[in-house]
Amino acid sequence: MSRLVVISNRVAQPRETRAGGLAAAMRAALKEAGGLWFGWSGKLVAEGERTLHRESAGAIDYALLDLTREEYDAYYLGFSNRTLWPLLHFQPTVMQYSRAQYAGYRAVNQLFAQKVAPLLRDDDHVWVHDYHLIPLAAELRSLGVGARIGFFLHIPLPPPELLVTLPCHLDLMATMGAYDLVGVQVKDDASALFRYFLGVLGTSRSGDVVELGGRQTRIAAFPISIDTAEVARQSQSVLGNAAIRKLRASLADRKLAIGVDRLDYSKGLPRRFAAFGRFLAEHREWRSRVSFLQIAPPSRQEVPEYRELRSRLERSAGATNGRYAEPDWVPIRYVNRSFAQATLAGFYRIAQLALVTPLRDGMNLVAKEFVAAQSPDDPGALVLSCFAGAALELPQAIIINPYDPERMVEGIEQGLTMPRNERRERWAAMFEHLLVRDINAWRREFLAALEGD
């Protein structure tokens, strides 16, 4: 059996206990045949102090590379997150581009390739993850690496009409032709990539394979998922935990609506906060009967747009709370910190409504985790954006357009008033799908495709 090599920007290290479902899936895949996980160490050092940290845990070897502050600023904060992230989330007007940052991005990909290439074998299967490392296969091929290399894009892919707004799109996107397999979240993403390859790069296509520079690349959708059974188990096992008991006691028999998102403009949080305030304005009968808990851990605080988003949400929550709060009730509970995955599962379990309303999302695993965590006897309702990849898999959710404030309000009311029998029917269909299409099915399907099966 061939060895698996996983390459990603960040690595779930052996002692990391808060790693999520993706990390667990990668560890499971690496353990099956033994393998190597390569990525950034999370450390910033001076150029002369760079180290490749090596360690092993069971059948898994880890190789972690330090970066300099300059590399991190250009590759990660710059091109990855101020250029690619907004563009790939369909927001080119937010995109900021500089040639220097793109050069830094390419340089770090080249550095990754130079450091990992000597560790590779010809019969390895290499799995590269996400937008930080799009050119990595091309860099590896230039060093003579002949192993099969697959790539999975965890975030959305816009149509060619938006991709071409990136000044370096021809140089960057052509590097995808160095992969044997490119996986995306949904069929629309695959269609967009096919259209780009054919219409912009001028490649030929046969079925789901394109040919560029004499190399064939398969493009296919592999919707990512969660460890459904584990989330369901966690949601029950943590109900006695202090954090869960405190939250439940603070509600005093009121209903709980919940949102869990990384603090990012793609998640549509200002519109969500405004919709909940509008719901209270239009439905006086729900005042003091429901609280909305938004958990939004800060991210990329070095980027000004993210700091401004945090301030905007604080002002919005403060305005709604100032208008409607009672001495014993606060409409919006806005929390800027992270929680362990098991604790979140418990929060989902006691919530009657989840608001998952991104403006654009490759998949959105919070929607799936909420469904998995629910009580089969009395499940909550899921309000889900039509622009999340999960909406294609969970059509039984209350599907809304986050750009339509009136529909957002209607969705909140529909979820809070939905009869129990209807909630159970909708939940059962979604849960059954997620049991079959879980994270392990996802990674096995991708790896089988990478192997050529």
Image (tube, grey):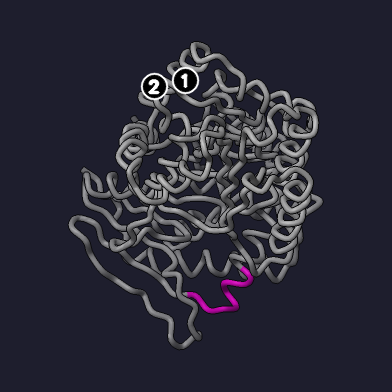
The part of the image, by quadrant, that contains residue 205 is: top right
Foreground: 421 or 68? 421
Residue at the extreme left of the image, as rendered: 58
Dot 1 amino acid type? Trp
Asked whether residue 212 is drawn in magenta, I would say: no
> Residue visible at 79% across and 32% down?
405
Q: Secondary structure beneath disc 2? A: loop
Dot 2 amino acid type? Pro
Would residue 54 be found to the left or right of residue 170 on screen?
left
Reply above or below: 192 against 122: above
1 and 2 marks in contact (CB < 8 Å): yes
The part of the image, by quadrant, that contains residue 49 is: bottom left
Query: Rounded to the nearest whole Å, what is the CA distance between mark 1 and mark 2?
Result: 8 Å
Dominant SS type (magenta): helix
Residue 376, numbered circle: 2
Asked whether residue 73 is drawn in magenta, I would say: yes
Reply above or below: 305 against 48: above
Residue named by callout 1: 427
Q: Secondary structure beneath disc 1? A: helix
Reply above or below: 77 against 288: below
> Residue visible at 51% across and 26% down?
380
Would residue 377 be found to the left or right of residue 250 on screen?
left
Residue at the extreme front of the image, as rendered: 327
The part of the image, by quadrant, that contains residue 210 is: top right
Residue 149 can be seen in this image: no
Q: Could you say where residue 342 lies in the image, as x and y percent from the top left?
A: 37, 46
Q: Specify the segment rendered in magenta.
A: 67-74
Residue at the extreme bottom of the image, as rendered: 48
Foreground: 380 or 285? 285
